[in-house]
Amino acid sequence: MRLVTLKDGSADGRLAVLSPDGKTCAAAPVTTLQAALEDWTHWAPLLAAVRNFPQPLDLSALAAPLPRAWQWLDGSAYESHGQLMAKVFGRKDDQRERPLMYQGMSDRFYGPNDDVPFPDESFGIDFEGEFGVITDEVPMGTTAAQALGHIRLLVQINDWSLRALASEEMKTGFGWVQAKPACSMAPFAVTPDEIGPQWRNGRVCLDLEVAWNGQRFGAANGEPMGFGFHELVAHAARTRHLVAGTVIGSGTVSNDNFREIGSSCIAERRGIEIVDEGAARTAYMKFGDVVRMQATTTDGRAPFGVIEQKVVRA
Amino acid sequence: MRLVTLKDGSADGRLAVLSPDGKTCAAAPVTTLQAALEDWTHWAPLLAAVRNFPQPLDLSALAAPLPRAWQWLDGSAYESHGQLMAKVFGRKDDQRERPLMYQGMSDRFYGPNDDVPFPDESFGIDFEGEFGVITDEVPMGTTAAQALGHIRLLVQINDWSLRALASEEMKTGFGWVQAKPACSMAPFAVTPDEIGPQWRNGRVCLDLEVAWNGQRFGAANGEPMGFGFHELVAHAARTRHLVAGTVIGSGTVSNDNFREIGSSCIAERRGIEIVDEGAARTAYMKFGDVVRMQATTTDGRAPFGVIEQKVVRA
């Protein structure tokens, strides 16, 4: 089952079910995805039972499948990315016994084709291709094994980052506020069965194809997370109940062979340049630049659809 | 004007207006505080016009005035606290050119008399007495001077912290997730005029009286913030729109003369012990412990009412 949210002028939009061929949709029997997640065992079968999809899909009318969430927690689970960044910034990156995670802005997720406004190019505008999961309500103390059953939907995310502001914020130990404005989501939120065996061990094992201004930038696979999503959910739920509709991100998808397959964010490419050539050559994004992200299955499908967005001056 | 939210079984509760004497209340002409904040210029005069308060106030039926928020950003604006903590933990605390701020869990604020559950006493359960503001929608790029007009309500907050988990999380640079579960709010959200001249320069200039198990613990005054709330709002809005109903916190209220007037959190008292005596003597909270917090005006009123809560095993 794949779900979309149609823009209707409200903050939460109007939930719809996508046809199997992805060309049409049907109004859902529940108004919003948030409402569906709050009573998922009731709504999921009713959503899955929709068989008639009369409405042509207008990509420009799509919001993020969850246009706002009560909670967004982003991990940094790809060790090849973490180790490179640590090396570039002279930080320690100890063998990790626990996941890295920060709490991010959740009151707005941009739709897949929305222009994304930033105040200043000098802030170091960067994309970050990620996978994410959406949970129903998760009780405090839920184990990783139990957490798998609370992962109701998979999503694909662009976690916008302002790199020139990130380093100073990180040094404080308080995490990021200015460096992490609103993220974007690909158009379709999907149940794990939609990617079949490529959902395994709590990982979205798909290639994430990233292009910047029409040039291929990377195609890292989602599999090599140091911690699976179920472990990220359990980490988050150690001392709090997770509200239904909590979104948990993987962090920038990255593979050990990033020199061959490329990267999911500019900062990683710049890191490779610094290590290999002594200085970063690649500049961050300019107003008018476009980033495109598509996760692809081994049989050539794009289960989450496509993020394609232009960066604009606020 | 002072506003309360009555528990009604829903996540957002039911908004009511408090009588001037604080003994009764009246159902508000708008259902929830969130809805009021989304159209404040419309609703504020209608809320202020309520003159008949027929319903006796039942303190045990009160939720937090804003029981959940789309965004909670907490500062650390009291330099006496920051400098002491930096000294104890061997961190640098440079003269600050910009506010410290992290994004916290916002999907739940405990009511003023709710029991507060934690999984384990060994996590270092601590209270943190703070002041906070609630804004309407704040456009990206709003200046500090403009931000003053977006501060619609003042609140009093207990920012629960799990100190044994905080240090490790802070070292990652990602901020806190496990160490910062849900906060609590005092029962009354108040318009700034309710504290008259004690709201000045974007600061809540009230003594915050804190007692732990009936023993006076501290009474720091809210005035000596290194940055005022208007500056915290502008900091937060530098790269994002702030959604209506954003809550921004001061961080632990602290004064230079903490050895005389006491502290608003246990960690600060332990820091003083470490500096003065070489080791911390005061243990963190145990299950069954009660913390009480009340901000008091110079003429003896408690505009926010009282937080009085017991810590319990989850």
Image: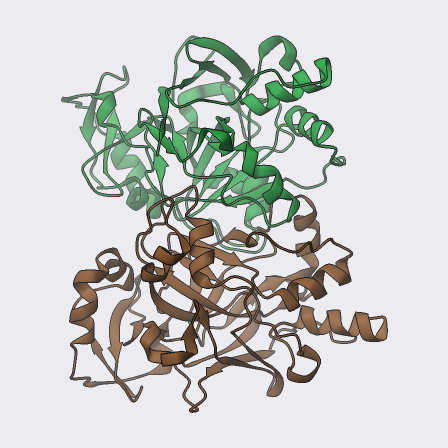
Chain colours: A green, B brown
Q: Compared with residue A311, is residue B247 higher up or lower down, i.e. above or below?
A: below
Question: Is A300 above or below relative to A237?
Answer: above
Give how far across and how far down residue A302 sits, in percent.
39, 15
The location of residue B15, given as percent across then percent down, is: 26, 69
**Relative to the observer, which residue lies in front, A272 or A207?**
A272
Q: Quadrant of residue A19?
A: top left
Q: Residue furthest bottom?
A: B299
* Residue B305 in the figure: left or right of residue B193: right
Q: Residue at x 32, y 38 (%)?
A: A67
Residue B166 at least partly seen:
yes
Q: Residue furthest left?
A: A54
Please name whichever residue, A109 or B60, is drawn nearer the observer in this view of the structure.
A109
Q: Quadrant of the N terminus of chain A?
A: top left
Q: Is residue A172 above or below residue A179?
A: below
Which quarter of the rendered picture does the C terminus of chain A lie within? top left
Residue A263 point in image, percent of width and height: 57, 17
Asked if residue B269 lies left or right of residue A297, the reply is: right
Q: Residue at x 51, y 39 (%)?
A: A179
- Find residue A196 and report its horizontal and vertical position in percent: 45, 20
Q: How many marks?
A: 0
* Residue at the spot 31% in from the left edge and 65% down from the top edge: B9
Report if residue B64 is visible in the image.
Answer: no
